[in-house]
Image (cartoon, coloured by chain):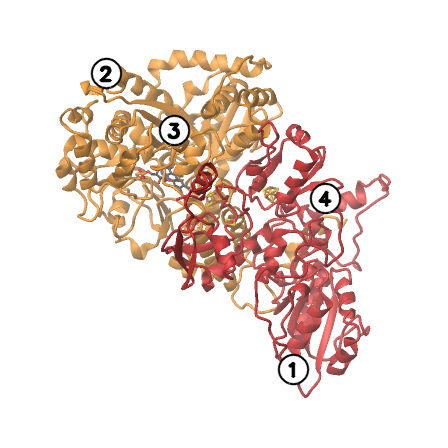
Chain colours: A red, B orange
Amino acid sequence: MSKAKMKTNGQAGNTTEKEPAQITITIDGREIRTEAGRNLVRVANENDIFIPSLCYFEHIEPPLGTCRVCTCKINGVAGPACTESVKEGMVVEASTEELADARNAIVEMMFSEGNHFCPGCQKSGDCDLQHMAYELGLRQTRFPHLFKDRLIDFNPQRMIMEHNRCIKCGRCVKEVFTDDGLAVFSFRYRGNETRVGIDYGQEAKLTDRQARDAMNLCPTGAIIVRGELHARPFGERRFDLQSVQKKKPVEDPRITLPAEKKTIATVSLAGCFGCHMSLLDIDLKLMDLVEIVELNKSPLNDIKEFTKQCDIGLIEGGCCNADNVEVLREFRRKCDVLVAFGECALWGGVPSMRNTIPLGECLEEAYLNCITSMPDECAVPYHDDLPKILDKVYACSEIVEIDYFIPGCPPDANHIWKSVLSLISGAQLPVLYSEFKYD
Amino acid sequence: MQLPESRSLRRKEEALNRKKVRRSGRQEAGLTVKRTELLDYLWQVQNEHGHIRSEDIAAVSRALNISTIEVEGVISFYHFFHRRPSGEFTIYLNNSPVSECKGFERVKEAFEMATGGNFNGVDPSGQWGLFETACIGLSDMEPSALINFFPFTNLNSLKVKDVIARLKQGALPGEICDPVPDHIRSVPGGEKTILLRDYDPGCALAVLRRRSPESVLEDIRRSGLRGMGGAYFPTGLKWAACRNDPKSPKYIFCNADEGEPGTFKDRVLMNSLPGLMLEGMAIAGYVVGSANGTIYLRGEYTWLKDKLQNTIDRFRKMNLLGTNICGIEGFNFDIRLQLGAGAYVCGEETAMLNSLEGKRGEPRNKRYFPTERGYLQKPTVINNVETFCAAARIIQLGVDQYLQTGRPASPGTKLLSVSGDCRLPGIYEIEWGTTVREILEKCEADRPYFVQVSGPSGECISMDEFDRAISMDDLVSGGSIMIFSRSRNILDILRNFNRFFKHESCGLCTPCRAGNFILEKKLNLFAAHLAHPSDVEDIRSWGKIMKLTCRCGLGKTAPNALLTAQEKFPEYFESIVAQNPDRLSKGFSLKDAVREYDRFSS
Ligand SMILES: Cc1cc2nc3c(=O)[nH]c(=O)nc-3n(C[C@H](O)[C@H](O)[C@H](O)COP(=O)(O)O)c2cc1C
Ligand code: SF4
Ligand code: SF4
Ligand code: FES
């Protein structure tokens, strides 16, 4: 029944041991011939049926089965594919709408549960979680971000435990041991308080190589070995350019522009203007842009007030103060279609780093207790002319209805361009894997 | 509960323990513990010192040759283990919805006032540790609390003041705690009463003298007995699978974790018929060929421990446990007690196995049945207390009499724990097939409106469904009925359930760990009157995702109450969502969002 058994038989057995039996299984109605006892996720993926997986790591036996990202129906029962070894006659449903949606939801949950600020993460571009979301084409999470306050543990000698990024896959817990056979990691607490604990004493006993292996074993940027991860430019990281899925190339559709120019308004709320800068990165296509659209209220032309009803509104940034909320609502009223572009607009992004700490504490730390503030001479700024600060940074979609989302910090220029062009023309311009980014 | 016999003894013990708590630590030298005894060891130091100290962790990890973080991981899994002093008097107040209905808030305040401490911490003097905890199995006497694990029931603010005052004067919790009556309200009567009838020790085991294991198994199979712990797996099949497995030794476990809020039938069985349960376990041992029985007793029932242990000792003396039981050559079976330490999920059978092995109580992947690979990877039978009791009765009374009760599709009887808004909360032994209405009438329910069947993981029913029958083919009930009257707020009940699951999830799989947290955020929107009709829709689809993808029953059933409530009380949910939703305002209120900033206005 188990792969473990097969494996050990194989190792212990003599060389004349017979080949594993060839069997036939059915995935999504397709018959597949393979060797008995192999892992279902691998068999499916080799046959171009993509089943996402995260906690699954080839060499960990038995498989962990913790993340549930690989949920399929196996012989009619829903369960993780990664814990299954294939058997003769196995019938697997992998790609039904319900299952695909549930798997997407689980990856989305990981993003809303942790605090994943991709542009600031050493593992960005090499991270399995991010990669899986790219493969699934996740633009934004359907769930509210939870913004639970978590520690970053700098105590270990060589490692840094970034609890914000841990997805509790359990790989490190099951796999990282010292030469004496003692565990370096263990889960602690339970429920939504669950986190990975690191044993400082045992960590110190790991060799440099073992420490590095632990970092590479971690699917996300939760285990970082000091000085071992250096930023590499875009394009040189593991998951930058190529999808692991073989997809048929899609031809660019023919684009027919509407007779009348569409009007567009843009704004930067609680953002850094980086998304607008990225927009300018479309270079020569800027010329095309002014040909086919008319810009209304926007920082690009410095028109401060709406002069008419617009077709499309592009929103950068989330809402951190009352003014942002007003502007966003005005955009909702004045634009037929609202597009949130960039991570800040999508879920809060970098400004929402403050969301794990109550506003009062943030303000006190910044204005009252900081080292440069003089006792009795400082106050939290509060004036009728100042917009009121919200208790946390809100995603645009938490305040008004948003029609489309473009991820990225900032979004790739081509991604923005193609999305706008699609909206104007009604054609579906395919966004390339390499243009779809969170950092 | 009977105190008198052991009263003076316990008094001495408690006084001794208290002294030990105060005394600073001493290092045990040459500690020997097995991994499977880790929980016992942790209980021992916790009882001795009021918490588990770093030196204890160092000592035990050295003895087990595991890293300290692994021990920390185990400790932090169980909410009765503390890493900081938990007070000379540790008070656990139940926060189940029934308790909330009966005055939890006032009682909580009263405890804080009387002790000078705040909940979920220890007061400055270090004397009083105040903690909230999930249902402690006393739903028929809420609000209730455990003080140093002794039960205090039917609390109100006056009683709390009185209890604390007496403790301050030097009384011991064990002396002044409340007796726990069984509250057996109704049985089918005559020959139809199966479980709660008179009992003579050995009545079922004596039958085995004339019977082979095969024929006993055949009886269990023919009786159609199913597991009473909530999953209703046919007991005969389970025993047969374990019996047929070639591996040995084999193990029998009694699941006395009874963690489902609102359920207390196992408590009553263990209090009034502990021997029957032991006989059921021994019968299982006889059938599958096992000599090792263990009762996994939840920490909340520590006060039942002595009684169970005494019964076990008495059984040994009577040759109802031990070797060559009842003179049957080669029938050896003994029973040991294992105390849990506060974790609902440990009632899940594979989580329980991990807990028994001295690990974190995380459910296992469902690759094998426990009957194939259970405790220490050996064939294992795990059954609920009531299942063992019923099995013993089937053997004692004969299958045919058993089959006379209940319905053809679900023969036999079932214990129901009834609590909430009714005049007669307690235990009802019913024949399968009894309707909800009959039960509501018997317990004199007060304007029943929202009835939760089988605890938070079960389903709720509305008035339209009171004629449904409790049976395998209609409304299956794991053993509890919580009644809420018209005056109760449905959202409060659902938020309580959600908080329970969020806290009790083992934290291993994403959809349960994050899903319950996410649902909480959604429910908060409802509570703040900011929810939209789309939020009702979201909950429905997200709940379905949890049911589909979670690893164990906890996560799969966590959204049940919420989903069924939405289905059965649509008009209620309509009344609490925004009436004219528009694209401009989702679940957001500017007024609420700037409130915190406005604190700085002056
Ligand atoms: C989260 C969870 C909690 C459970 N708690 C209990 C419990 O407290 N007592 C119990 O007998 N069964 C409990 N069960 C059911 C057990 O997993 C198992 O099915 C049962 O002990 C088997 O015994 P039975 O066949 O006699 O019912 C629980 C299951 C789950 C998923
Ligand atoms: S630290 Fe990394 S490897 Fe360990 S559980 Fe978290 S995500 Fe998995
Ligand atoms: S469903 Fe919940 S309790 Fe069960 S294994 Fe998953 S996280 Fe743990
Ligand atoms: S990859 Fe299968 S459960 Fe995580």
Q: CA distance from mark 3 to mark 2?
A: 23 Å
Residue corresponding to mark 2? B318
Q: Chain of mark 2?
A: B
Above or below A111: residue B316: above
Residue corresponding to mark 1? A255
Front position among marks 4 and 1: 1
Q: Residue furthest front?
A: A16
Front position among marks 4 and 2: 2
Above or below A286: residue B338: above
Dot placed on the residue nearer the N-terminal end, 4 or 1: 1
Q: Looking at the picture, which amino acid does disc 4 mark? A: Glu
Q: Is mark 2 within 8 Å of ligand 1?
A: no
Residues B246 and B581: in front is B246
Marks 3 and 2 share the same chain: yes
Above or below B456: residue B247: above
Local secondary structure at mark 4: helix
Q: Looking at the picture, which amino acid does disc 3 mark? A: Leu
Mark 1 is surrounded, within 10 Å at the Cα level, by few (under 14), some (14 to 19) or many (20 or more) other residues, namely some
Mark 4 is surrounded, within 10 Å at the Cα level, by few (under 14), some (14 to 19) or many (20 or more) other residues, namely few
Q: For residue B44, say whether it is visible.
A: yes
Residue corresponding to mark 3? B297
Local secondary structure at mark 1: loop
Q: Quadrant of residue B177?
A: top left
Residues B28 and B492: in front is B28
Local secondary structure at mark 2: loop
Q: CA distance from mark 4 to mark 2?
A: 67 Å
Q: Is mark 1 within 8 Å of ligand 4?
A: no
